[in-house]
Image (tube, coloured by chain):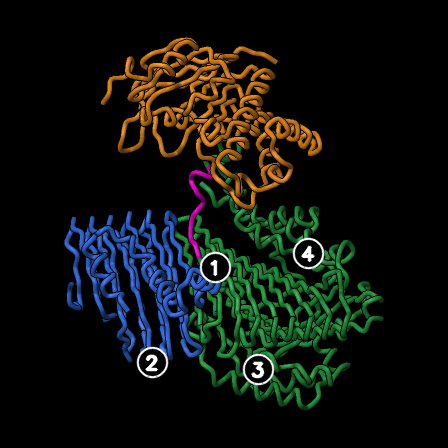
Chain colours: A orange, B green, C blue
Amino acid sequence: MTSKNTLKIKNLYAGTANKKIIKNLSLTIGSGEIHVIMGRNGCGKSTLLNVLMGHPKYETEKGQVLLNKKNISKLNPDEKAKFGLFMSFQHPVEIPGVPLTTFLRTAKNTITKKHSSPIEFLEEIKKYAKLLKMTDSQIERSINHGFSGGEKKKSEILQMSILKPKFALLDEIDSGLDIDALKAVATTIKESFKETKMGLLIITHYQRILNYITPDFVHIMDDGKIIKSGGKSLAKELEKNGYDKYISKK
Amino acid sequence: MAIPKRTKRLIDTTFGDYKFGFKSTVDNYFVSHKHLDESLVKEISEQKKEPSWMTDFRLKSLGIFNKKPLPTWGGDLSRINFNTLHYYIKPQDSTKTAWNKVDPNIKEAFDTLGVREAEKEFMAGLGAQFDSEVVYKSVQDALSKQGVIFDSTDNALRNHPELFKEYFGKIVPANDNKFAALNSAVWSGGTFIYVPKGVHIDLPLQAYFRINTESMGQFERTLIIADEDSSVHYIEGCTAPIYSSNSLHAAVVEIIVKKNAKVKYTTLQDWAHNIYNLVTKRSFVYENGEMIWVDCNMGSQLTMKYPAIYLLGKGAKGEVHSLAIASKNQHQDAGSKIIHGASNTSSLVSAKSISKDGGRSSYRGLLKVNKGAKNIKSKVSCDALILDKISRSDTYPLMKIDEEDVSIAHEATVSKIGEEELFYLMSRGISEQEASSMIVNGFAEPIIKHLPMEYAIELNRLLELEMTGSVG
Amino acid sequence: MEKLQKKLVIKENSTKNILLTDIDNTEIYLNKNTVLNLAIVTKKGSIEPKNINFTLEENSHLNFLTIILGKKNNKFLFTTTANHISKNTTSNCIIKSAIFDESIVDYKGKIKITDEGENTVSHLTHKSLMFSENAKVNTLPSLEIEADSVKAGHSASVGKMDEEMLFYLQSRGLNTNSAKNLLLRSFLEEDIEQFNDKNLLQLIKKELII
């Protein structure tokens, strides 16, 4: 099922009504590639992902976001999802009264335009839930209702595994996870990645996830744009020496 | 309000905007003249062949009605003209017990609403009301063998006079409020249920109301008596066709829950948008008894309804779960009234409201703890969802606490559909409209879960229907 | 400490900290970009009902705390209304009443948000602690909302002293009276930290010495 997809961000300028945050950012991600963005707090990493997914708080001022040559930057979030984009939220919301399974099945049927039977679907959920070490009762609840931070992150990866996007944007997937949870999440991401060869764009908080997932490309972001790109050795260097070499202290 | 899919589709394609707006032609057996006066009241009593005490009761109530002023709080009642309403219409000559003996036009109206289907599929017994008289009822053999009485209020007065007289008008006296007085004067139809000691009725009993004739007032009177250690669940659902002049529905429901008994009363109200729905519902709960009101209000032009629970015996419990949906030109003024009149009693009120397209929904509640009622626990929560700038939501929860040994909490929130929540669902490929619909259904879920499954499914679908066209 | 005023206007772009020791009829107008921290600590009841009315202009913020110590047969009959008539305003109204003897607290609090009140964040709370069989409280916190982009809520609670807490303190050597006083004090003081002004906080604590 491996087709070659490209996500091309060209000279992107974006921000809120009052503040410019992304300033001339360009980045290309292909299928089967794992990209990691690192940078100090406030450089715009999370904002970038939210802009890509279409959060109503942000406006795109200039530039293009091309998914397989189609400019998706002005589309609604649900349309972006249908084109194959997925974001794992940094702070997933709780939506009481809406069961996770029902919602996820609707989403899957909408995105894939296929109708899986409830039994098939349940089996698929259970497969990933097992990998993620989630309990049956957690799956049966309303969306993220009563979940701890770590459990919410697991729920995000569960959804990603079911929806099988072309490109997955993971916003600080490692924050709020203890050692066991981190391992379960990383294993599931790798399993999903292996199945679909999606393109991954990961924003990491602690870098710990890089102990389990080896990136192909590492980018450093500062003040709304990418200032340095390299391979996995760049990540190791940053871990050792910090950001000072690349980002001047403010 | 159990409407099978095929029926609903038929109604949707035929009627578009309002789902059940249609008129049947029926040969009405007797139509009362419009003027509300003593001769009318006497005529009604005569037609029903009532004992003299009831005629006196009616006349006295008329006097009270005339004296009382219209309430100035709540909704706008100024446009009701009491002299242009029909007060009594009897479409048949007697209550039919077999469905095939009912007037064919009436049958058709009910069939279209899927009422009979509901009985076939699900319910233990069914009483259906059409313009003031109960035209059809069926009570399963097992129930009547157990001594359960499930009949129209008119028949109950005739067939069980002592039982009737013992409780009628004792829980909601005629002078309680203007519309209780009106009902007491011209009441007709309604349900009477008596559950003997120790009898538990597992499947819900249901009835069905309709207002058909233009300018008809509906004044049904329901009386439910649950004797010690018994339990029953009663469901009422109402619809009415659309008319241009305003119709009035002023019902009274009286419920007695005796020691260790349990009563659950579920209402699904979806009257047409020209109806004034002014209802007095009250229950007295005795030692260790339990009363649960599940009240869903979606229709009518103005609803003023505050299901009340008087906890009069030690250990009594009460719950009110209410859902109000106010759309264009609608005002739902609903709530609850809980009186803790004995010690060790507890109450729970959970009210949710949704206002859209300029609708107004108000929660009006009273929580009272009388002096001497000790060890009281109560929790009230009301949440309101406002879907657009032109709609309105009010909350007026009054607490009157005359005791110190209490633990009482009340909270209310008002919000709109969260931007973050919408974005989250849309980022999973779900359209804005469907996402809004999911969130609204999720909001109403804690109330809907108290309905029997078939109604819950139907209400969810109706909520989705309401949501189409209100986003964007 | 300011004396009672019938009308109080908070000048544009300013912050005011006020402590009152009476509930009296007052009109309070918050101009654009203002912050009002108002605390009322009172033991004096009144026979007539009193009303405090707040009007909030664009980007104004109200922190309002009323602490009532009701003893003997003092009656506290009052209403407060927060009118949010403009956008981006916030109000946090907290009423705390500790009611003893035959004292009565009768409070109606209203949050009104007109359709101009976009992005209002407003909360109203009334918490009452009852200390005698003859104490009474009537409370009606109400909301009238006409705008949709708001976060508004209210809550009310009535109870008596938590027996578990009392027992805990006693088990640590405090006698009943000391324990009760400690719990009472913590109840009355628990919301004063919302005021950042040190001066105001000191004044409030002084008034609370029972």
The residue lying at 67 percent from left, 67 percent from top is B263
Which stretch appears magenta? B412-422
Question: Tag 4, which chain?
Answer: B
Q: Quadrant of residue B98?
A: bottom right
The residue lying at 85 percent from left, 71 percent from top is B145
* 1 or 4: tag closer to the N-terminus: 4
Camera-nearest label, 3 or 1: 3
Viewed as shown, does residue C182 lie left or right of A70? left
Q: Quadrant of residue B238?
A: bottom right
The answer to whether residue B434 is seen in the rendering is no
Name the spot of residue B418 as percent of width and height, x first. 43, 43
* 3 or 1: tag closer to the N-terminus: 3
Name the spot of residue B123 as percent of width and height, x first. 75, 59
**Residue where numbered disc 4 is placed:** B113
Q: Residues within 10 Å of mark 3 (few under 14, many from 20)?
A: some
**Residue where numbered disc 1 is placed:** B330
Q: Which amino acid type is shown beneath numbered disc 3?
A: Pro
Estimate the spatial distance between the alpha carbons at disc 3 and disc 4, rounded to whole Å. 34 Å
Asked if the residue at tag 1 contacts the one at tag 3, i.e. Cβ–Cβ closer than 8 Å, the answer is no
Estimate the spatial distance between the alpha carbons at disc 4 and disc 2, rounded to whole Å. 61 Å
Reply above or below: A147 against C59.
above
Asked if the residue at tag 3 contacts the one at tag 2, i.e. Cβ–Cβ closer than 8 Å, the answer is no
Q: Residues within 10 Å of mark 4 (few under 14, many from 20)?
A: many
Q: Which amino acid type is shown beneath numbered disc 4?
A: Leu
Estimate the spatial distance between the alpha carbons at disc 2 and disc 1, rounded to whole Å. 45 Å
Camera-side residue of A90 and C200: C200
Estimate the spatial distance between the alpha carbons at disc 3 and disc 1, rounded to whole Å. 29 Å
Element marked by disc 1: loop
Estimate the spatial distance between the alpha carbons at disc 1 and disc 4, rounded to whole Å. 23 Å
Question: Tag 3, which chain?
Answer: B
Which dot marks residue B173?
A: 3
